[in-house]
Image: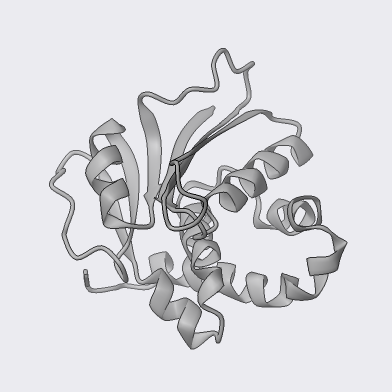
Amino acid sequence: MEERIIIAGFGGQGVMAMGQLLTYSGMIEDKKVSWLPSYGPEMRGGTANCNVIISTDPVGSPVVIEATTAIVLNKPSLDKFESTVVPGGKLFINSSLIDRKSTRDDIDIYYVPANEIANELGNSRIANMVMLGAYLEVTHTVEVESIYKAFGKVFGESKAHLLPLNKEALDRGRQMVTQPQAETV
């Protein structure tokens, strides 16, 4: 098993946190992992993406050129990374912020209104966790319980009180892809 993931969006959307959670979760499950962050020149609001590889075999390079999955949180990221997903791969689109459909017909596409769900839960900053929940439900790359365990490593003990809200966001994201849904943008 080897999952090659590109996670992309604006700085401040939690792109790196998603990658770190996946990476730590892979380590918790004794898998081979790599995490490679990439930032635009701006501190916040600029572009941000990371490459995550989770594998049962040693990882040769942390660079993801052909992704098995792309998780895109904004339209510039969709424009840039949609073509990197291998045929048969998966594309997760934050339909709250992206106003177009994917042009691909050779991959599985999931439209998740992550910002809308995060706002319903009372915290716009957890849209990334909604997307992560959808991803985990479809791929089962790591167990959700491992994400919970990794939370403290990524966010520190001072943020432990936020775990219940983040669990709820993960659950709502998982529900988005298990219940029939109309494709909305």
Q: Give the left or right position of residue 73, taking residue 149 as reference.
A: left
Look at the picture and state if 138 lies above or below 85.
below
Look at the picture and state if 12 lies above or below 184.
above
Q: Residue furthest right?
A: 157
Image quadrant of residue 168?
bottom right
Q: Which quarter of the rendered picture does the C terminus lie within?
A: bottom left
Query: Which residue is at the front of the view, 18 or 25?
Result: 18
Image quadrant of residue 145?
bottom right
Look at the picture and state if 25 lies above or below 53.
below
Q: Give the left or right position of residue 130, taking residue 166 as reference.
A: left
Which residue is found at the position 57% from the left and 12% from the top? Answer: 60
Residue 106 placement (x, y as % from top left)? 18, 38
Which residue is found at the position 16% from the left and 58% from the top? Answer: 101
Which residue is found at the position 34% from the left and 44% from the top? Answer: 90
Image quadrant of residue 88?
top left
Residue 36 placement (x, y as % from top left)? 56, 31
Residue 62 placement (x, y as % from top left)? 55, 22
Q: Give the left or right position of residue 148, taking residue 131 as reference.
A: right
Which residue is found at the position 55% from the left and 71% from the top? Answer: 125
Q: How many labels does the image show?
A: 0
Look at the picture and state if 174 lies above or below 65.
below
Q: Give the left or right position of residue 50, taking residue 83 as reference.
A: right
Q: Residue furthest front?
A: 42
Q: Which quarter of the rendered picture does the N terminus lie within?
A: top right
Residue 22 placement (x, y as % from top left)? 62, 45
Q: Which colour scheme is used?
A: one colour
